[in-house]
Amino acid sequence: MNSPAPFPRVARGDRTLIQIVDAAMAEAVRRSGPWIACRQGCTPCCIGPFPITQLDALRLRAGWRELAARDPARADEVRRRAGRFLARFAAEFPGDPASGILDESEQAEGRFAAFAEDEPCPALDPAAGVCDLYEARPLTCRTFGPAVRLGGEAVGVCELCYQGATEEEIAACEVDPDPDDLEGALLAELAEEGGPSGQTIVAFALLEERPSRGGGES
């Protein structure tokens, strides 16, 4: 827990990415006003696993280490939830359960659609209805709800939001949270530095620190 965080240059770039994304999403919320239904304790989007990048995984593990230093009991419970999740579902994981890397073939994507679909995210405190790793949450979590546009294409919004809004009104609220694809550049840099590649899920990201191929940056 006290060892240096891996890939510090990528981590610095990720902090910049998060600032850009969070600022864009704040603008989307401002434009959307009362159409945004997202509130603390609203957790439907926290049910069922979803693919995350290795950049998300690094951020989650860093967030967990910060939580462990601040509130060890809470951090231990996050890890226990991740462990229970994998104890129940690892055998059904549509990928490599040893590495936690998802198989991204078309057949595996079909299996993933039904994988643990009713299970809460291990980072979610089910009693309080809050994310224990909120500041370190994946980009999917950060951008879900308000209207966003990625790579020129509109992304679906939360079905609880924009009730009564027209398509034109929703489009007027759209933002591009990563217009220069900084995330893609950081993932490429992570791979160049010998870091892990491929998508995973939150439970695998949290349960154990896996050694990288190259051992990180000096």
Image: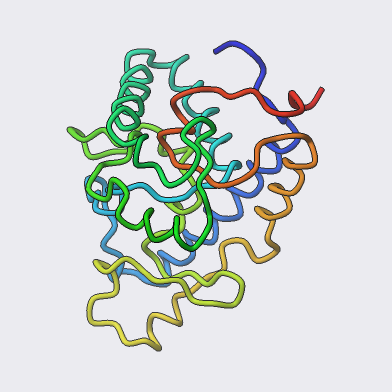
On-image quarter of the N terminus: top right
Image height check: is 3 above or below 171? above
Q: Which of 63 and 199 is in front in this view?
A: 199
Residue drawn at (59%, 77%) of the image: 152
Residue drawn at (56%, 62%) of the image: 177
Image height check: is 154 above or below 68? below
Q: Which colour scheme is used?
A: rainbow
Q: Where is residue 31 in the image (x, y as percent from the top left)?
A: 42, 72
Residue drawn at (41%, 39%) of the image: 134
Q: Where is residue 211 in the image (x, y as percent from the top left)?
A: 64, 23
Q: In this view, does 185 lie to the left or right of 141?
A: right
Residue drawn at (65%, 66%) of the image: 179
On-image quarter of the C terminus: top right
Q: How many marks?
A: 0
Q: Which residue lies furthest to the left in this view?
A: 127
Image height check: is 203 above or below 51? above
Q: Is residue 95 left or right of residue 121?
A: right
Q: Image quadrant of residue 41?
A: top left
Q: Position of residue 180 (x, y in %)?
A: 70, 63
Q: Is residue 42 left or right of residue 145?
A: left
Image height check: is 28 above or below 126? below
Q: In this view, does 171 lie to the left or right of 48?
A: right
Q: Which of 54 and 162 is in front in this view?
A: 54
Q: Image quadrant of residue 197?
A: top right
Q: Position of residue 161 (x, y in %)?
A: 28, 68
